[in-house]
Amino acid sequence: MVGYQTIATVPIYMDIANSTWLWLATVPVVLVVLLQAGLFLQRAWKNGNEMGLSDEQLKTGLKTGVISAIGPAVAVLAGMLALIATVGGPVAWMRLSVIGSVAFELPAAELGVSQFGYSLGDDGISEQAYATAVWSMTLGGTGWLLVSALGTPHMEKVRQRIGGGKEKLIPIISSAAMLGAFAYFLTGEVTAGTPETGSVAAGGLAMLGLLQVADKKDVQWIREWALGIAMVVGLAVGIIIQLSIGSLW
């Protein structure tokens, strides 16, 4: 009796996607991002001291920022796992270090390979199709970077002009802009399906409850951890709904 063993085949292009040379090519990009983060942190700390903030206040702000980054980092990490399986480790690492949006990277890669008649996950994807996918991801993301680089220096003037020179309106305008940005990102998720709706609702209720407890009890650490905890709660609820009942719409 002869036994047969099925051996899982790896697409040919993955040899290039996970090659040493591609790892070396992506390292400088990630190092630039880390350097920018370090320089920004250093400058923010220096400017904070010049504004009269104490080291204790700056440490509290730093700790709050680190905690608030936990939720988005978990989401990006989960998306990176999906991206690694389709475009390889180096490109996934580099792209999500620069942009951090799996919602853009996967469709861009799909658009690239589709020009050769493939779809992500197909075994026969050629090296040319893979290269096109990487170029689609890279060139497609340059628009955001250019807008940020060219437009950000003028945003303060715009904010001051909207405020009409009234200093009391500036914090209100800034808060409204932040709420508008969060609302813009949430509107697409709320109607995407039951897990997404439940995730948004649970995260919002968790944030509201934590802030109320922090205000009533005057507990600073709850304020610092509120956003990170709310994001994790939202992610957990979304996963539970997806695994239990799936999407109802």
Image: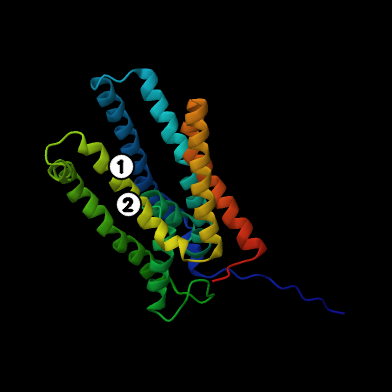
Instruction: Examine the rendering and report whether any part of residue 117 can be seen.
Output: yes
Of residues 48 and 167, the one nearer the viewer is 167
Residue 55, above or below 208: above
Mark sitting on residue 208? none
Relative side of 48 to 121, left or right: left
Residue 2, above or below 54: below
| Amino acid on which disc 1 is placed | Ser
User: Which residue does the image show at 36% across and 24% down from the upper left?
Assistant: 58
Q: Which residue is mark 1?
A: 175
Of residues 122 and 37, the one nearer the viewer is 37
Relative side of 56 to 205, left or right: left
The C terminus lies in quadrant: bottom right
Residue at the far bottom in the pictured view: 117
- Kind of element beneath mark 1: helix
Percent position (x, y) of residue 208?
49, 42
Percent position (x, y) of residue 226?
49, 37
Disc with the residue nearer the chain's start (1 vs 2): 1
User: Which residue does the image show at 31% across and 59% down from the upper left?
Assistant: 141
Mark sitting on residue 180? 2
**Quadrant in the rendering for residue 102:** bottom left
Residue at the far front in the pictured view: 216
